[in-house]
Amino acid sequence: MNSNSLNTVLSYYQAGTKHQFKEMAEYLHPNVQFISPAGKLDGKHAFIKAATGFFKMVESLDIRASFGNENRAMLAYTAHFPSPIGPFPAAALITLEDGLIR
């Protein structure tokens, strides 16, 4: 059974893959933070700009595994990019606050 946090995260990714960026932004907390080996982003504006660029490049996204509880969700997915990048396996651990991705 999916938790509410997992449903929110899955809806966010679905909106992104459909290039529905305004809808995608609705799932984000104003103080969203993104941390990766490439760097850190703080705030909704910076995050949505980067996420929009990401989803514009992705041809498709396959979610291989997902689970969540009341305030966290975990996804393992493969983002499929055009050549020469190709399939890119990734994982995300996402915290939610007030029902929004934080």
Image (cartoon, helix red, strand yellow):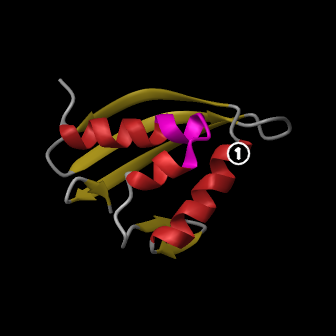
Q: How many marks?
A: 1
Q: Quadrant of the N terminus?
A: top left
Question: Magenta part mainly helix, strand or loop?
Answer: helix
Q: Amino acid at mark 1?
A: Lys
Residue 32: image quadrant is: bottom left
Residue at horizontal 33%, vertical 63%? 102
Residue 38: image quadrant is: bottom right
**Where is 6 relative to 1, above or below?**
below
Image location (x, y in percent) of residue 76: 44, 36
Image location (x, y in percent) of residue 85: 78, 41
Q: Residue furthest front?
A: 22
Q: Could you tell me which secondary element the residue under label 1 belongs to?
A: helix
Magenta residue span? 14-21
Examine the structure image and report whether residue 56 is included in the region drawn in magenta: no
Examine the structure image and report whether residue 16 is included in the region drawn in magenta: yes
Residue at horizontal 46%, vertical 65%? 34
Mark 1 = which residue? 56
Image location (x, y in percent) of residue 73: 28, 44
**Where is 32 relative to 56, above or below?**
below
Image location (x, y in percent) of residue 52: 62, 54
**Where is 64 relative to 30, above or below?**
above
Whether residue 75 is visible to the viewer of this picture, yes or no, is no
Q: Residue furthest right?
A: 84
Q: Is 66 positioned to the left or the right of 91 in the image?
A: left
In front: 80, or 27? 27
